[in-house]
Image (cartoon, coloured by chain):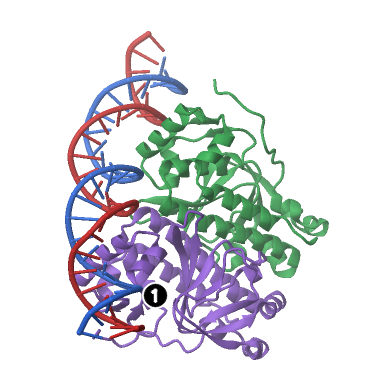
Chain colours: A green, B purple, C red, D blue
Amino acid sequence: MLPRTSQTVTPTINRLLYQLTPEAQDRIFPHLRQVYMQLGDVIYEAGEELDYVYFPVDNIISLLYVMSDGGSAEIAVVGFEGVVGIAVFMGGESTPSRAVTQSAGWAYRLPARELKDEFNQHPGMRMIMLRYTQALITQMSQTAVCNRHHTIEQQLCRWLLLSLDRLPTNQLSMTQELIANMLGVRREGVTEAAGKLQKKGVIEYSRGHIAVLDREMLERLSCECYAEVKRETDRLQSYPEPL
Amino acid sequence: MLPRTSQTVTPTINRLLYQLTPEAQDRIFPHLRQVYMQLGDVIYEAGEELDYVYFPVDNIISLLYVMSDGGSAEIAVVGFEGVVGIAVFMGGESTPSRAVTQSAGWAYRLPARELKDEFNQHPGMRMIMLRYTQALITQMSQTAVCNRHHTIEQQLCRWLLLSLDRLPTNQLSMTQELIANMLGVRREGVTEAAGKLQKKGVIEYSRGHIAVLDREMLERLSCECYAEVKRETDRLQSYPEPL
DNA sequence: CACTGTATGTTCGTTTTCCCACATAAAGAA
DNA sequence: TTCTTTATGTGGGAAAACGAACATACAGTG
């Protein structure tokens, strides 16, 4: 049996939706619909036009880039702090990446049209979405740097922390094979890194389940990339002036 | 003496400024000022608030991420097709990356305030800026993937092509040391890759000067990342409907 | 219970890149 | 010219990651 620790966050609603003014909430909420996403569900394919955007609550979506030779790499993850489908308001309508459910759970679905209208007509929604987009850009940049400079073990730590921050528990349902796809490395590389972490008592895992036992240690073993992204995301989502 | 080929593009004005409606141009152009940037000039530091944004004309700006241990990696380049300083309208005011002049030349400088006002008040400017930002996101994502999966030689080809597309000539003034900083690899790695390319007759170089002799071959030797970014950027900057 | 599919562990040789040290050579300054 | 700085070339050893093949071991199914 895998041990549990007290949860650090209990997401009940999406942070972006929460930040909306009451008036904006009155306009938007009627169009929201709760949807449940299973592990592996593809939210959208590369190049696909989006009919809906999704505001995760307790699930995690992975933005994955898949190359023509089958190689892949995760460029960012989205949880309750963000939204999936920024191409809707950025104007491109689609992106070259794929969005896959990395952790099952609930999200709010909003018709693209509604978001677009609110975005175009109300500076409040615009500011929230654009600041989040900048946070996403930061995450992508940092991923690029991380891919260049850090070891698989460091990246695994970063990845676990990113997931942990978006989940209500310290438990992840995820095989090493899938983690390898996200990090864009071989499965064996993840096995080795995970083995080391387990030996150190940082995590415990078994057949698709990972429990984080020592989060502090995990942060120490991670590269600076995790903390950098977290700091910048927090900065961008704490508003000095009221909306 | 390094040979020259006919130039493929002759940037005379920035593409984003060019796309503005005549009315928007009337509002914006009076605030523009031409500035010359020397190789190595730092446009802004990580975390620095921006007073101006810059629309390159025949120069190239590199968005560089520098880590605490001194390691670095370029996450995107900006030329006449774009703008430096998206944090101004994205709302963050600053980014964790540094902007450095990678190729000397002229750019238009615009006070951040003017851009912000136009962006907030006119959908035309908004659409142009946001679509460009999405193109930039694409470039960053692709860089992340490229860093993970491709060899130094492939990445060097991609990098040369990105630069070439933004210059009026086939000549680059750039040492291998600097290229190594951009790619986030060792100088020796670049020396080796560049040596191979020269042996193949694709490029010719000498002490800080590189001439591309066979662009077609360069594209063949590059990974798919170059073509992907170019295609998506072109898509995002060709507007199906008029502004 | 045995069976089967899936997740993880392990090994070996190879490739790529890294780190370090030093050699060579061109460009500019004195 | 000579000296110095800077750019590039080269080589040896180490580390990290890769590719492939195979071993083990758990979980769910019948």
Q: Quadrant of residue B201?
A: bottom left
At horizontal 76% and vertical 56% (from top left) the residue drawn is A20
Q: What's the chain of the residue with tag 1?
A: B
Residue located 55% across and 23% down the image: A2
Position of the N terminus of chain A by quadrant: top right
Asked if A12 appears above or below A240 in the picture, the reply is: above
Q: Quadrant of the C terminus of chain A?
A: bottom right
Q: What secondary structure is marked by label 1?
A: helix
Q: Position of residue A43 (x, y in %)?
A: 54, 50
Name the kind of residue labelled 1 in the image: Ser
Asked whether A168 or A27 is in front, the reply is: A168
Residue A201 drawn above or below residue A139: above
Q: Residue at x 40, y 51 (%)?
A: A72
Q: Nearer the viewer, residue A134 or A116?
A: A134
Disc 1 packing (10 Å; few <14; some 14–19; many ≥20):
many
Is residue B155 among what the camera can see?
yes
In the displayed structure, does residue B227 sit left or right of residue A198?
left
Residue A210 drawn at (x, y percent): 51, 31
Left or right of residue B13, residue A242 in this image: right
Residue A38 can be seen, yes or no: no
Q: Residue at x 50, y 61 (%)?
A: B65
Residue picked out by circle 1: B163
Displayed quadrant of residue C10: top left
Left or right of residue B84, residue A6 in this image: right
Query: Foreground residue, B117 or A152?
Result: A152
| Location of residue B12 in the rendering, given as x and y in whole percent from the top left corner | 47, 89
